[in-house]
Amino acid sequence: MDVESLERDHGGGEAFYTYIHFDVGKGDTVRFWHDRRISGGEDCDWHIRFGRAFNDWEIEEVASFFQLLQVKSPTRVDVDKMRWDLKKNEAFDIRSYYLALRGSENISFPWKGIWGVKAPRRIAFFVWTASWGRILTCDNLRRRGIILVWWCWMCRCSGETMDHLLLHCPVAREIRSYVFQLFGVEWVTSGCVMEMVAGWRNWFGKHYSEVWNLVPHCVMWSIWRERNSRTFEDLEHSVDQIIEFCMRSLFDWAKA
Ligand SMILES: [Zn+2]
């Protein structure tokens, strides 16, 4: 998994930026107010040597020459480099990030409900990030100072918070109620993602819940995928198509 897909699929979240700093070169990729940075070596400056002393009548011209130089400082040639604080060699790796996030683990966190199911690892990682409230929904982006239209891409009304998008949005409800009907279950949606995942596992008992345990991953991943398709690709599927994708994934993961 690379940084880009981590960011795209899972948001990576605010935590990601607390573990990097920039080695500034040209400075064109560094956000001045937001990114932590160290200067890239010596400051760039002009060093001018004149072949002879000036005459009195030339002073003004020399002064304006220096003024001109001041606004045209030489630019650095090196590109900006991103450094990862959690590794000695400063290169990003997923394991160190994982361990850093896991450091704030608390006892009631639903580890088995997230990692102990047959879903692909990257999907489990997405659910894990969502359970920490760290995927990049509008509310989390706004906290990072990124201003955008604050609506839910699925129902196009309420402001998009993570719990709204994945749990309380009418579209999320419709998809879940389809699944509940399939399993013949009545279910009251919990307040937040972590609670839902925690209460979900082994509802049909330890030996009959293998497929059921995959449902939160399946439903939330289908919604997140559709949300990103609408946001970034301007491509919209109907609720029926989302449900179809969700069911196909459930089937594929269950038989894998
Ligand atoms: Zn919505």
Image (spheres, grey):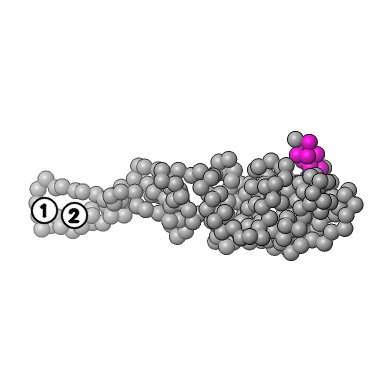
Q: Please name the predominant secondary structure of the magenta segment in the image.
A: helix
Q: Is residue 186 magenta?
A: no
Taking depth in this image into account, of 71 and 7 the one nearest to the observer is: 7
Q: Amino acid at mark 1?
A: Phe
Residue 56's spot in the image, x, y percent? 10, 58
Q: Quadrant of residue 4?
A: top right
Give left or right: position of 37 versus 96: left
| Mark 2 element type | helix
Taking depth in this image into account, of 107 and 237 the one nearest to the observer is: 107
Residue 192's spot in the image, x, y percent? 71, 61
Bin the neighbour count of mark 2 within 10 Å (Cα to Cα): few under 14, some 14-19, many 20 and up: few
Residue extending furthest front?
206
Q: Quadrant of residue 117?
A: top right
Residue at numbered disc 1: 54
| Relative to 109, residue 234 above or below | above
The structure residue drawn at horizontal position 54% and vertical position 50%, both measured from the top left corner, is 99
Give left or right: position of 73 versus 186: left
Bin the neighbour count of mark 1 within 10 Å (Cα to Cα): few under 14, some 14-19, many 20 and up: few
| Mark 1 element type | loop
Q: Is residue 103 visible?
A: yes
The structure residue drawn at horizontal position 73% and vertical position 55%, both measured from the top left corner, is 197
Q: Point out the tag, 2 or 1, that comes first from the N-terminus.
A: 1
Residue 113's spot in the image, x, y percent? 71, 51
Q: Are marks 2 and 1 in contact (CB under 8 Å)?
A: yes
Start-end of magenta stretch: 246-255
Give left or right: position of 201 versus 78: right
Q: Amino acid at mark 2?
A: Val
The structure residue drawn at horizontal position 76% and vertical position 46%, both measured from the top left corner, is 214
Residue at numbered disc 2: 62
